[in-house]
Amino acid sequence: MARLSFYGATGTVTGSRHLLELKNKKYLIDCGLFQGKKENRLKNWEPFPVSPNEIDRVFLTHAHIDHTGFLPRVVKDGFQGPVHSTRATHDLNNIMLRDSAHLQEEDAKWANKKGFSKHKPALPLYTTQDAEDALKLFQPKYYGEEFFIDDNIRVKFKDAGHILGSSFVEFRTRNNDKIRKILFSGDIGRPDRPVLRDPTQVFNVDYLVLESTYGDRLHDDVDPTPHLARIINESVERGGVLVIPSFAVGRTQTLLFVLRELEEQGKIPSLPVYIDSPMAIKTTDVFEKHLADFNITTRMLTLEGADVFHPKKLRISRTREQSIEINSVEKDAIIISASGMITGGRILHHMFERLPDPKNTVLLIGYQAEGTRGRTILEGNEYVKIHGQQVPVKAKIESITGYSGHADYNEILAWLMGFNKPPEKTFIVHGEPEASRSMADKIRKLYGWDVVIPEFGNSFDLDME
Protein backbone atom coordinates (compact mmCIF):
# COMPACT_ATOMS: atom_id res chain seq x y z
CA MET A 1 0.00 0.00 0.00
CA ALA A 2 1.05 3.57 -0.66
CA ARG A 3 1.13 5.96 2.27
CA LEU A 4 0.47 9.70 2.65
CA SER A 5 1.73 11.60 5.70
CA PHE A 6 1.14 15.22 6.67
CA TYR A 7 4.02 17.16 8.21
CA GLY A 8 2.79 20.71 7.66
CA ALA A 9 -0.14 22.91 6.66
CA THR A 10 -2.32 21.12 9.23
CA GLY A 11 -4.30 23.49 11.41
CA THR A 12 -2.42 26.39 9.84
CA VAL A 13 -2.00 28.01 6.42
CA THR A 14 1.78 27.67 6.30
CA GLY A 15 4.48 25.01 6.26
CA SER A 16 3.10 22.83 3.46
CA ARG A 17 4.91 19.48 3.58
CA HIS A 18 3.24 16.25 2.44
CA LEU A 19 5.12 12.95 2.17
CA LEU A 20 3.91 10.41 -0.39
CA GLU A 21 5.42 6.92 -0.17
CA LEU A 22 5.01 4.96 -3.40
CA LYS A 23 6.70 1.73 -4.42
CA ASN A 24 9.33 2.01 -1.67
CA LYS A 25 10.21 5.59 -2.61
CA LYS A 26 9.57 8.76 -0.61
CA TYR A 27 8.34 11.88 -2.41
CA LEU A 28 7.90 15.21 -0.62
CA ILE A 29 5.22 17.44 -2.11
CA ASP A 30 5.99 21.02 -1.09
CA CYS A 31 8.69 21.94 1.38
CA GLY A 32 7.48 25.12 3.00
CA LEU A 33 8.40 27.32 5.93
CA PHE A 34 6.08 27.70 8.87
CA GLN A 35 5.20 31.36 9.35
CA GLY A 36 3.03 33.46 11.64
CA LYS A 37 2.69 32.50 15.31
CA LYS A 38 5.89 31.75 17.21
CA GLU A 39 4.72 28.23 18.03
CA ASN A 40 4.47 27.59 14.29
CA ARG A 41 7.78 29.25 13.43
CA LEU A 42 9.57 27.12 15.99
CA LYS A 43 8.58 24.03 13.98
CA ASN A 44 11.08 25.11 11.34
CA TRP A 45 13.83 24.28 13.83
CA GLU A 46 12.54 20.82 14.67
CA PRO A 47 14.10 17.81 12.94
CA PHE A 48 12.04 16.76 9.95
CA PRO A 49 10.12 13.56 10.83
CA VAL A 50 11.78 11.75 7.95
CA SER A 51 15.51 11.98 7.50
CA PRO A 52 16.08 14.25 4.45
CA ASN A 53 18.58 11.81 2.96
CA GLU A 54 15.75 9.24 2.76
CA ILE A 55 13.62 11.52 0.54
CA ASP A 56 13.97 10.57 -3.13
CA ARG A 57 12.40 13.59 -4.82
CA VAL A 58 10.72 16.90 -4.00
CA PHE A 59 7.80 18.34 -5.98
CA LEU A 60 6.81 21.99 -5.58
CA THR A 61 3.33 23.30 -6.34
CA HIS A 62 4.47 26.93 -6.53
CA ALA A 63 7.14 29.36 -5.40
CA HIS A 64 5.65 30.94 -2.28
CA ILE A 65 7.92 30.51 0.72
CA ASP A 66 5.29 28.67 2.79
CA HIS A 67 5.50 25.98 0.08
CA THR A 68 9.22 26.11 -0.79
CA GLY A 69 11.18 27.95 1.90
CA PHE A 70 12.22 24.88 3.92
CA LEU A 71 13.98 23.34 0.92
CA PRO A 72 17.45 24.77 1.68
CA ARG A 73 17.18 23.34 5.18
CA VAL A 74 16.41 19.79 4.01
CA VAL A 75 19.28 20.12 1.53
CA LYS A 76 21.52 21.29 4.38
CA ASP A 77 20.40 18.23 6.34
CA GLY A 78 21.16 15.72 3.58
CA PHE A 79 18.58 15.74 0.76
CA GLN A 80 20.28 15.42 -2.64
CA GLY A 81 17.53 14.23 -4.99
CA PRO A 82 15.92 16.13 -7.87
CA VAL A 83 13.45 18.97 -7.26
CA HIS A 84 10.60 19.17 -9.77
CA SER A 85 8.50 22.26 -10.48
CA THR A 86 7.22 24.29 -13.40
CA ARG A 87 9.72 26.47 -15.22
CA ALA A 88 8.29 29.70 -13.84
CA THR A 89 8.40 28.30 -10.30
CA HIS A 90 12.06 27.47 -10.84
CA ASP A 91 12.79 30.99 -12.08
CA LEU A 92 10.92 32.54 -9.15
CA ASN A 93 12.70 30.29 -6.66
CA ASN A 94 16.01 31.48 -8.04
CA ILE A 95 14.99 34.78 -6.48
CA MET A 96 12.93 33.70 -3.50
CA LEU A 97 15.17 31.06 -1.96
CA ARG A 98 18.18 33.35 -2.16
CA ASP A 99 16.12 36.14 -0.62
CA SER A 100 14.81 33.88 2.12
CA ALA A 101 18.34 32.75 2.99
CA HIS A 102 19.51 36.36 3.08
CA LEU A 103 16.67 37.25 5.46
CA GLN A 104 17.58 34.28 7.67
CA GLU A 105 21.14 35.53 7.86
CA GLU A 106 20.11 39.15 8.44
CA ASP A 107 17.66 38.18 11.18
CA ALA A 108 20.42 36.25 12.96
CA LYS A 109 22.80 39.21 12.68
CA TRP A 110 20.15 41.60 14.00
CA ALA A 111 19.32 39.28 16.90
CA ASN A 112 23.00 39.06 17.82
CA LYS A 113 23.44 42.83 17.57
CA LYS A 114 20.42 43.62 19.73
CA GLY A 115 20.82 40.65 22.03
CA PHE A 116 17.16 39.61 21.99
CA SER A 117 17.77 35.96 21.12
CA LYS A 118 18.23 33.38 23.86
CA HIS A 119 20.72 31.60 21.58
CA LYS A 120 24.35 32.73 21.82
CA PRO A 121 25.05 33.27 19.02
CA ALA A 122 21.81 33.24 17.06
CA LEU A 123 22.22 31.21 13.87
CA PRO A 124 20.24 31.32 10.61
CA LEU A 125 17.94 28.41 9.76
CA TYR A 126 19.99 28.10 6.59
CA THR A 127 22.52 30.12 4.65
CA THR A 128 22.81 31.56 1.17
CA GLN A 129 25.08 28.65 0.27
CA ASP A 130 22.37 26.20 1.34
CA ALA A 131 19.95 27.99 -0.99
CA GLU A 132 22.47 27.82 -3.84
CA ASP A 133 22.89 24.10 -3.22
CA ALA A 134 19.12 23.62 -3.33
CA LEU A 135 18.78 25.52 -6.60
CA LYS A 136 21.26 23.18 -8.30
CA LEU A 137 18.82 20.30 -7.79
CA PHE A 138 15.91 21.75 -9.82
CA GLN A 139 14.66 19.92 -12.91
CA PRO A 140 11.85 22.19 -14.18
CA LYS A 141 9.00 21.05 -16.44
CA TYR A 142 6.39 22.63 -18.70
CA TYR A 143 2.71 22.71 -17.82
CA GLY A 144 1.08 19.52 -19.07
CA GLU A 145 4.38 17.77 -19.74
CA GLU A 146 4.17 14.13 -18.71
CA PHE A 147 7.27 12.70 -17.08
CA PHE A 148 7.91 9.33 -15.49
CA ILE A 149 9.75 8.95 -12.19
CA ASP A 150 9.27 5.18 -12.29
CA ASP A 151 8.15 2.79 -15.02
CA ASN A 152 4.63 2.96 -13.58
CA ILE A 153 4.50 6.45 -11.98
CA ARG A 154 3.72 9.45 -14.15
CA VAL A 155 3.64 13.04 -12.90
CA LYS A 156 2.11 16.12 -14.49
CA PHE A 157 1.92 19.79 -13.50
CA LYS A 158 -1.38 21.56 -14.28
CA ASP A 159 -1.98 25.32 -14.08
CA ALA A 160 -3.48 26.26 -10.70
CA GLY A 161 -3.96 29.95 -11.52
CA HIS A 162 -2.70 31.12 -8.12
CA ILE A 163 0.59 32.83 -9.02
CA LEU A 164 2.88 32.62 -12.01
CA GLY A 165 4.00 29.00 -12.33
CA SER A 166 1.59 27.65 -9.71
CA SER A 167 0.40 24.13 -10.34
CA PHE A 168 -1.63 21.16 -9.28
CA VAL A 169 0.68 18.15 -9.01
CA GLU A 170 -0.89 14.94 -10.28
CA PHE A 171 0.60 11.49 -9.69
CA ARG A 172 -0.73 8.60 -11.76
CA THR A 173 0.22 5.00 -11.04
CA ARG A 174 -0.37 1.97 -13.22
CA ASN A 175 -0.47 -1.62 -12.03
CA ASN A 176 -1.30 -3.82 -15.02
CA ASP A 177 -4.57 -2.25 -16.23
CA LYS A 178 -5.34 -0.51 -12.93
CA ILE A 179 -4.75 3.25 -13.03
CA ARG A 180 -4.89 5.39 -9.87
CA LYS A 181 -4.41 9.13 -9.36
CA ILE A 182 -3.72 11.53 -6.50
CA LEU A 183 -3.75 15.29 -6.95
CA PHE A 184 -2.15 17.91 -4.69
CA SER A 185 -3.88 21.25 -5.17
CA GLY A 186 -1.23 23.51 -3.67
CA ASP A 187 -3.03 26.85 -3.61
CA ILE A 188 -5.98 27.22 -5.97
CA GLY A 189 -6.31 30.49 -7.86
CA ARG A 190 -9.39 32.45 -8.83
CA PRO A 191 -11.21 32.72 -12.16
CA ASP A 192 -11.25 35.89 -14.25
CA ARG A 193 -8.23 37.52 -12.61
CA PRO A 194 -5.84 40.02 -14.19
CA VAL A 195 -2.77 38.58 -15.91
CA LEU A 196 -3.09 34.84 -15.09
CA ARG A 197 -5.12 32.03 -16.59
CA ASP A 198 -8.02 30.37 -14.75
CA PRO A 199 -7.23 27.21 -12.73
CA THR A 200 -7.22 24.08 -14.89
CA GLN A 201 -10.32 21.95 -14.42
CA VAL A 202 -9.52 18.51 -13.02
CA PHE A 203 -11.93 15.67 -13.79
CA ASN A 204 -10.85 12.35 -12.41
CA VAL A 205 -8.70 11.61 -9.34
CA ASP A 206 -8.90 8.95 -6.66
CA TYR A 207 -7.40 11.05 -3.88
CA LEU A 208 -7.35 14.81 -3.48
CA VAL A 209 -5.25 16.99 -1.14
CA LEU A 210 -7.13 20.29 -1.07
CA GLU A 211 -6.26 23.70 0.38
CA SER A 212 -8.78 25.60 2.53
CA THR A 213 -7.30 29.05 3.15
CA TYR A 214 -10.66 30.70 2.47
CA GLY A 215 -12.74 27.69 3.47
CA ASP A 216 -15.03 29.81 5.66
CA ARG A 217 -15.02 33.06 3.72
CA LEU A 218 -16.18 34.61 0.48
CA HIS A 219 -14.48 37.35 -1.43
CA ASP A 220 -16.47 40.49 -2.10
CA ASP A 221 -18.74 40.07 -5.11
CA VAL A 222 -17.94 43.59 -6.30
CA ASP A 223 -15.01 44.44 -8.53
CA PRO A 224 -12.19 45.53 -6.16
CA THR A 225 -10.71 47.96 -8.67
CA PRO A 226 -13.14 50.87 -7.97
CA HIS A 227 -12.48 50.30 -4.26
CA LEU A 228 -8.74 50.63 -4.93
CA ALA A 229 -9.33 53.82 -6.92
CA ARG A 230 -11.35 55.30 -4.05
CA ILE A 231 -8.62 54.53 -1.51
CA ILE A 232 -5.96 56.12 -3.72
CA ASN A 233 -8.00 59.27 -4.33
CA GLU A 234 -8.89 59.61 -0.64
CA SER A 235 -5.22 59.19 0.26
CA VAL A 236 -4.41 62.13 -2.00
CA GLU A 237 -7.18 64.20 -0.41
CA ARG A 238 -5.88 63.34 3.07
CA GLY A 239 -2.47 64.68 2.11
CA GLY A 240 -0.50 61.60 3.03
CA VAL A 241 1.16 58.53 1.54
CA LEU A 242 -0.50 55.22 0.71
CA VAL A 243 1.51 52.19 1.91
CA ILE A 244 0.60 48.77 0.53
CA PRO A 245 2.25 45.71 2.11
CA SER A 246 2.25 43.28 -0.79
CA PHE A 247 3.59 39.87 -1.61
CA ALA A 248 6.50 40.30 -3.98
CA VAL A 249 5.33 37.42 -6.15
CA GLY A 250 1.97 37.81 -7.84
CA ARG A 251 0.23 40.47 -5.79
CA THR A 252 2.71 43.25 -6.61
CA GLN A 253 2.50 42.51 -10.34
CA THR A 254 -1.32 42.50 -10.20
CA LEU A 255 -1.24 45.87 -8.44
CA LEU A 256 1.09 47.33 -11.06
CA PHE A 257 -1.16 46.02 -13.83
CA VAL A 258 -4.29 47.52 -12.24
CA LEU A 259 -2.65 50.86 -11.37
CA ARG A 260 -1.53 51.26 -14.98
CA GLU A 261 -5.08 50.56 -16.19
CA LEU A 262 -6.63 53.01 -13.69
CA GLU A 263 -4.21 55.71 -14.84
CA GLU A 264 -5.01 55.11 -18.49
CA GLN A 265 -8.73 55.29 -17.70
CA GLY A 266 -8.26 58.59 -15.84
CA LYS A 267 -9.71 57.17 -12.62
CA ILE A 268 -6.67 58.02 -10.50
CA PRO A 269 -3.94 60.66 -10.86
CA SER A 270 -0.51 59.55 -12.02
CA LEU A 271 1.33 59.29 -8.72
CA PRO A 272 4.88 58.18 -8.04
CA VAL A 273 4.64 54.43 -7.36
CA TYR A 274 7.62 53.18 -5.36
CA ILE A 275 8.41 49.48 -5.62
CA ASP A 276 10.63 48.97 -2.61
CA SER A 277 11.36 45.28 -2.70
CA PRO A 278 14.35 43.86 -4.55
CA MET A 279 12.52 40.56 -4.84
CA ALA A 280 9.41 42.19 -6.32
CA ILE A 281 11.58 43.99 -8.87
CA LYS A 282 13.32 40.77 -9.93
CA THR A 283 10.01 38.92 -9.90
CA THR A 284 8.47 41.41 -12.32
CA ASP A 285 11.35 40.64 -14.69
CA VAL A 286 10.48 36.93 -14.41
CA PHE A 287 6.82 37.69 -15.18
CA GLU A 288 7.86 39.48 -18.36
CA LYS A 289 9.90 36.42 -19.35
CA HIS A 290 6.88 34.09 -19.08
CA LEU A 291 4.32 35.85 -21.27
CA ALA A 292 3.05 32.46 -22.49
CA ASP A 293 1.68 31.78 -19.00
CA PHE A 294 -0.54 34.89 -19.05
CA ASN A 295 -4.20 34.84 -19.96
CA ILE A 296 -5.05 35.72 -23.54
CA THR A 297 -6.27 39.25 -22.71
CA THR A 298 -2.94 40.20 -21.16
CA ARG A 299 -1.01 38.60 -23.99
CA MET A 300 -3.01 40.67 -26.48
CA LEU A 301 -2.15 43.84 -24.55
CA THR A 302 1.55 43.04 -24.82
CA LEU A 303 1.15 42.42 -28.55
CA GLU A 304 -0.36 45.90 -28.81
CA GLY A 305 2.73 47.35 -27.16
CA ALA A 306 1.49 47.81 -23.58
CA ASP A 307 4.13 47.69 -20.85
CA VAL A 308 1.60 46.02 -18.58
CA PHE A 309 3.49 46.27 -15.28
CA HIS A 310 4.66 49.90 -15.58
CA PRO A 311 2.52 52.80 -14.30
CA LYS A 312 3.70 56.14 -15.69
CA LYS A 313 5.68 57.25 -12.63
CA LEU A 314 7.08 53.92 -11.52
CA ARG A 315 10.05 54.33 -9.17
CA ILE A 316 12.34 51.36 -8.55
CA SER A 317 14.15 51.25 -5.21
CA ARG A 318 16.85 48.64 -5.57
CA THR A 319 19.30 49.75 -2.89
CA ARG A 320 18.97 50.36 0.82
CA GLU A 321 19.85 54.02 0.22
CA GLN A 322 17.01 54.40 -2.30
CA SER A 323 14.66 52.78 0.21
CA ILE A 324 15.66 55.22 2.95
CA GLU A 325 15.15 58.17 0.58
CA ILE A 326 11.44 57.31 0.38
CA ASN A 327 11.13 58.47 4.00
CA SER A 328 11.42 62.05 2.76
CA VAL A 329 8.25 61.68 0.62
CA GLU A 330 5.45 63.34 2.57
CA LYS A 331 2.39 63.02 0.31
CA ASP A 332 0.88 62.02 -3.02
CA ALA A 333 2.71 58.73 -3.45
CA ILE A 334 2.16 54.99 -3.28
CA ILE A 335 4.68 52.68 -1.62
CA ILE A 336 4.45 48.97 -2.42
CA SER A 337 6.78 46.80 -0.37
CA ALA A 338 7.09 43.25 0.89
CA SER A 339 6.12 41.25 2.79
CA GLY A 340 2.36 41.13 2.34
CA MET A 341 1.64 40.09 5.95
CA ILE A 342 4.29 42.50 7.33
CA THR A 343 6.33 39.60 8.69
CA GLY A 344 9.67 40.90 7.41
CA GLY A 345 11.45 42.83 4.69
CA ARG A 346 11.57 46.55 3.94
CA ILE A 347 7.87 47.02 4.63
CA LEU A 348 8.71 46.94 8.36
CA HIS A 349 10.66 50.19 8.04
CA HIS A 350 7.87 51.88 6.09
CA MET A 351 5.26 50.77 8.61
CA PHE A 352 7.46 52.01 11.45
CA GLU A 353 7.74 55.36 9.67
CA ARG A 354 4.17 55.79 8.40
CA LEU A 355 1.82 54.11 10.89
CA PRO A 356 1.93 56.87 13.56
CA ASP A 357 0.71 59.60 11.15
CA PRO A 358 -3.10 59.82 10.61
CA LYS A 359 -2.59 61.46 7.20
CA ASN A 360 -1.18 58.20 5.86
CA THR A 361 -3.12 55.18 4.67
CA VAL A 362 -2.18 51.51 4.98
CA LEU A 363 -3.93 49.17 2.56
CA LEU A 364 -3.91 45.48 3.48
CA ILE A 365 -4.52 43.64 0.26
CA GLY A 366 -5.16 39.95 0.78
CA TYR A 367 -5.08 37.31 3.47
CA GLN A 368 -3.44 38.10 6.83
CA ALA A 369 -2.56 34.94 8.74
CA GLU A 370 -3.07 34.57 12.47
CA GLY A 371 -0.07 35.81 14.43
CA THR A 372 1.22 38.19 11.75
CA ARG A 373 1.53 41.96 12.12
CA GLY A 374 -0.93 42.31 9.26
CA ARG A 375 -3.58 40.44 11.27
CA THR A 376 -2.77 42.54 14.36
CA ILE A 377 -3.39 45.75 12.41
CA LEU A 378 -6.45 44.39 10.60
CA GLU A 379 -8.06 43.46 13.93
CA GLY A 380 -7.90 47.09 15.05
CA ASN A 381 -5.17 46.93 17.67
CA GLU A 382 -3.85 50.31 18.75
CA TYR A 383 -0.22 49.19 18.66
CA VAL A 384 1.88 46.74 16.68
CA LYS A 385 5.36 45.55 17.59
CA ILE A 386 8.04 46.40 15.01
CA HIS A 387 11.78 46.08 15.64
CA GLY A 388 11.11 45.49 19.32
CA GLN A 389 9.05 48.67 19.75
CA GLN A 390 5.30 49.21 20.15
CA VAL A 391 4.33 51.42 17.21
CA PRO A 392 1.02 53.32 17.44
CA VAL A 393 -1.46 52.58 14.67
CA LYS A 394 -2.76 56.05 13.78
CA ALA A 395 -2.84 55.77 9.97
CA LYS A 396 -6.08 55.06 8.13
CA ILE A 397 -6.37 51.28 7.73
CA GLU A 398 -8.08 49.90 4.62
CA SER A 399 -8.50 46.35 3.39
CA ILE A 400 -9.26 44.74 0.03
CA THR A 401 -9.65 41.00 -0.45
CA GLY A 402 -10.73 41.01 -4.08
CA TYR A 403 -7.18 40.72 -5.38
CA SER A 404 -6.49 37.62 -3.35
CA GLY A 405 -4.79 34.83 -5.22
CA HIS A 406 -6.75 32.22 -3.26
CA ALA A 407 -10.11 30.86 -4.36
CA ASP A 408 -12.84 31.35 -1.77
CA TYR A 409 -15.07 28.46 -0.73
CA ASN A 410 -17.65 29.02 -3.48
CA GLU A 411 -14.92 29.11 -6.12
CA ILE A 412 -13.41 25.90 -4.74
CA LEU A 413 -16.84 24.22 -4.64
CA ALA A 414 -17.47 25.28 -8.24
CA TRP A 415 -14.09 23.79 -9.24
CA LEU A 416 -14.93 20.55 -7.43
CA MET A 417 -18.25 20.41 -9.29
CA GLY A 418 -16.27 19.68 -12.44
CA PHE A 419 -15.05 16.32 -11.12
CA ASN A 420 -16.74 13.47 -12.96
CA LYS A 421 -16.55 11.20 -9.91
CA PRO A 422 -15.98 11.74 -6.18
CA PRO A 423 -12.44 11.16 -4.96
CA GLU A 424 -12.32 8.17 -2.64
CA LYS A 425 -10.91 10.48 0.01
CA THR A 426 -10.33 14.22 0.14
CA PHE A 427 -7.77 15.62 2.60
CA ILE A 428 -8.30 19.22 3.72
CA VAL A 429 -5.09 21.13 4.49
CA HIS A 430 -3.58 24.61 4.43
CA GLY A 431 -6.21 26.42 6.49
CA GLU A 432 -6.79 27.66 9.98
CA PRO A 433 -8.93 25.18 11.97
CA GLU A 434 -12.30 26.88 11.46
CA ALA A 435 -11.65 27.40 7.74
CA SER A 436 -10.72 23.73 7.24
CA ARG A 437 -13.73 22.50 9.21
CA SER A 438 -16.04 24.78 7.27
CA MET A 439 -14.62 23.64 3.92
CA ALA A 440 -14.94 19.99 4.88
CA ASP A 441 -18.53 20.43 6.08
CA LYS A 442 -19.54 22.16 2.85
CA ILE A 443 -18.05 19.41 0.68
CA ARG A 444 -19.74 16.69 2.73
CA LYS A 445 -23.10 18.45 2.67
CA LEU A 446 -23.08 19.47 -1.00
CA TYR A 447 -21.37 16.47 -2.60
CA GLY A 448 -21.40 13.72 0.03
CA TRP A 449 -17.66 13.08 -0.34
CA ASP A 450 -15.47 11.32 2.21
CA VAL A 451 -13.48 14.23 3.68
CA VAL A 452 -10.70 14.10 6.28
CA ILE A 453 -8.91 16.93 8.08
CA PRO A 454 -5.51 15.45 8.98
CA GLU A 455 -3.53 16.50 12.02
CA PHE A 456 0.22 16.99 12.09
CA GLY A 457 1.94 13.63 11.70
CA ASN A 458 -1.16 11.72 10.59
CA SER A 459 -0.56 9.02 7.97
CA PHE A 460 -3.07 7.31 5.66
CA ASP A 461 -2.83 4.18 3.54
CA LEU A 462 -3.75 4.72 -0.10
CA ASP A 463 -4.69 2.17 -2.74
CA MET A 464 -2.15 3.43 -5.28
CA GLU A 465 0.01 0.37 -5.96
Image (cartoon, rainbow, N blue to C red):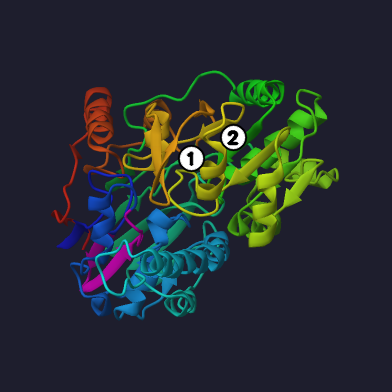
**Residue drawn 65% across the image and 54% down it:** 323
Residue 33 colored in magenta in the image:
yes
Residue indicated by mark 1: 189
Pick the front one: 327 or 142: 327
The kind of secondary structure element at disc 1 is: loop
Estimate how packed mark 1 is, as few (under 14), some (14 to 19) or many (20 or more) residues with alpha carbons within 10 Å.
many
Picture layout, residue 246 above or below residue 91? above
Across and down, in percent, residue 389 comes to: 40, 46
**Residue drawn 22% across the image and 68% down it:** 48
Across and down, in percent, residue 134 comes to: 44, 75
Q: Quadrant of residue 328?
A: top right
Would residue 278 be found to the left or right of residue 38 on screen? right
Pick the front one: 44 or 415: 44
Residue indicated by mark 2: 193
State how far apart marks 2 and 1 are (Cα).
9 Å
Q: Bounds of the magenta span? A: 18-34
Residue 275 colored in magenta in the image:
no
